[in-house]
Every structure is written in structure tokens, then in C-alpha cells.
Image (spheres, rainbow, N blue to C red):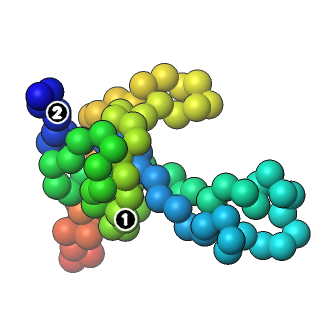
């Protein structure tokens, strides 16, 4: 039996989940589109260990908690700027924490 590799908390992943099933799609969408579910893909940091294909909770860069099936590890941006740089992924959150912790008493 092959051991499933679980990704650690904090790993940058992409998840997906169905938002609308085929029978729930709008009547005006083309037949080939209406035949498949509407899928939501979200990138974020794992909140719990998980493996590819497993359901997991993530935290997005905007701080939202979402749940879905892990579909990709260290997902690339498809616009071609290369692999994500782990050190840069958290800069926005770190800056927000620093700014929220500062005082205007200067």
C-alpha cells in the first residue's frame, strides 16, 4: 500500500469545489457548458495537513477561510511570471499586522 504524502500546514495550494451542479446552471448557458458543474478555484495556505485530492481548509491572501479539494501544490500564476516566491507570499499580511500594531502617537 502506497503512503499518501500529506502537505504541512501553511503550504500554498489551489483548491476547487463545485458551486453549481449541471441542473442548477442558468438556462441561457450553452448546452455543453450546462452539462458540467460551475467550479470555483481558490489559492491559499493550508490550515491543516492534507494530501492532493483531499478536502482541506485554506486561508487566502485576503484572510478569508475557504474549503475545497486540494488540486495543486505551489500553483503557478498562468500569466507567466514564474513560480511563487514563498518569502513574498506573506508580505501583505505581515505589513498589515505591522500597520495595525503601529500607533499614531508620534
Q: Which residue is mark 2?
A: 5
Q: Which residue is mark 1?
A: 66
Q: Can you give x and y, in whole percent of width and height, for residue 42 in the image?
A: 46, 53
Q: Quadrant of the N terminus?
A: top left
Few, some or many residues within 10 Å of mark 2 (<14, 14–19, 20+) = few
Report the side of 48 relative to 74 (left or right): left
Q: Tell me how far mark 2 sits from mark 1, CA to CA.
A: 22 Å
Report the side of 54 relative to 69 (left or right): left
Residue located at (58% from left, 24% from top): 80
* Residue 10 visible in the displayed image: no
Q: Can you give x and y, in whole percent of width and height, for residue 60 in the image?
A: 37, 57
Residue depth check, mark 2 versus mark 1: number of the one nearer the observer: 2
Question: The residue tagged with tag 1: helix, strand or loop?
Answer: strand
Q: Eyeballing the image, is 29 above or below 71?
A: below
Q: Can you give x and y, in whole percent of width and height, for residue 14 in the image?
A: 41, 45
82 or 102: nearer the eye? 82
Q: Quadrant of the C terminus?
A: bottom left
Q: Can you give x and y, in whole percent of width and height, for residue 28 in the image?
A: 88, 69
* Residue 29 visible in the displayed image: yes
Residue located at (42% from left, 25% from top): 83
Amino acid at each position: 500500500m502506497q503512503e499518501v504524502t500529506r502537505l504541512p500546514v501553511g503550504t500554498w495550494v489551489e483548491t476547487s469545489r463545485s458551486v453549481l451542479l449541471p441542473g442548477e446552471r442558468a438556462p441561457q448557458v450553452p448546452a455543453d457548458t450546462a452539462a458540467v458543474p460551475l467550479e470555483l478555484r481558490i489559492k491559499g495556505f493550508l490550515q491543516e495537513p492534507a494530501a492532493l485530492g483531499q478536502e482541506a481548509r485554506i486561508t487566502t491572501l485576503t484572510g478569508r477561510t475557504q474549503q475545497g479539494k486540494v488540486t495543486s501544490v505551489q500553483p503557478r500564476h498562468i500569466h507567466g511570471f514564474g513560480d511563487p516566491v514563498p518569502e513574498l507570499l506573506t508580505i501583505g499580511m505581515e505589513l498589515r499586522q505591522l500597520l495595525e500594531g503601529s500607533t499614531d502617537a508620534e
